[in-house]
Image (tube, grey):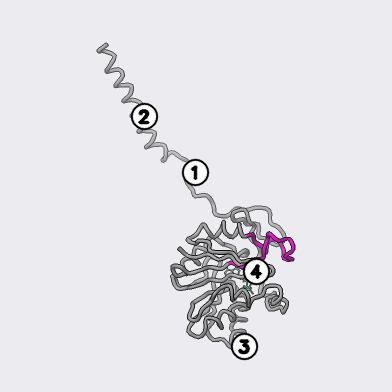
Amino acid sequence: MNRARPKLVTLSGLVLALFLLSALVAPAAAPAAERRPAPIYEEGPKSRDGIGKFYLGREISQVMGHEGADWLERPERLREESPELLHELLGLKRGMVVADIGAGTGYHSWRMARQVGPSGKVYAVDIQPEMLALIAVNMPARGVSNVVGVLGTTTSPKLPANSLDLVLMVDVYHEFNQPHEMLTAISQSLKSGGRVAFVEYRAEDPLVPIKGLHKMTEAQVRLEAERHNLVWVETHAELPWQHLILFRKR
Ligand SMILES: C[S@@+](CC[C@H](N)C(=O)[O-])C[C@H]1O[C@@H](n2cnc3c(N)ncnc32)[C@H](O)[C@@H]1O
């Protein structure tokens, strides 16, 4: 009886030693590929209007070239998009500092500039210098002097940190080449409690006559935005073809 006991101790000691050894050795032995973080984007079949790069199941659309600038100023837009109603819904106030990211010709920048007034400021950001050249001509022609043009990159709008009350993106987010990086940078540029407004053509509505990749569902916008420091506030469906989806920085 007495002789069996040391044998038991030896066995359990051995099991413990093996367990400790495996815990120490296993992580170091894992192949390097297993330790790499999952890629943010995926590649897939490229559709006619897309770039063959996917984010959370959505194919990213091609960027609208500056050659199409006239389309942004088409008179029918007033009927199709009700920009005045959109700006009412945004709740802009005098003195606010806001950004129009993917500003194009500045179709929304000058409207915001009037609402925030001379004590406020609008950053009009685009990645195409040709669009910024149009903004530089169009803003004085509209009688506003509080719009500042900014040449952004595909990963950052190059805006000062913690400085904005509102970021507006009209018909642009779906064509961001690096949406994850852009939203990280946008969130950093907002003040605490600042808001970001996505305005996208409603993909849920087959009657909205816009190409598939240029539309987004509310669910997809929320899936992508809520990965960041942003909390959903409300969604407006009063606009003719678009939804306005608003988030607030935590
Ligand atoms: C379809 S236009 C919309 C213009 C404007 N928001 C409007 O509603 O009239 C999209 C614009 O977004 C710009 N854009 C695309 N990716 C961008 C990015 N990562 N940062 C800033 N602008 C971007 C394009 O150059 C283009 O001028």
Residue at 27% x, 18% y is: 6
Check the image and report above or below for 52 versus 189.
Answer: above
Rendering coords of residue 94 (x, y %): 50, 81
First of labels 3, 4 by sequence position: 3
Rendering coords of residue 96 (x, y %): 49, 78
First of labels 2, 3 by sequence position: 2
Residue 15 included in the magenta stretch of the image? no
Element carrying mark 2: helix
Pointer 3 local density, CA inside 10 Å: few below 14, some 14–19, many at least 20: few
Check the image and report above or below for 20 versus 4.
Answer: below
**Can you identify the residue that label 2 sits on?**
18
Closer to us: 83 or 170: 83
Element carrying mark 4: loop
Q: Which mark is residue 34?
A: 1
Rendering coords of residue 173 (x, y %): 60, 65
Magenta region = 198-217
Element carrying mark 3: helix
Pointer 1 local density, CA inside 10 Å: few below 14, some 14–19, many at least 20: few
Residue at 72% x, 65% y is: 208
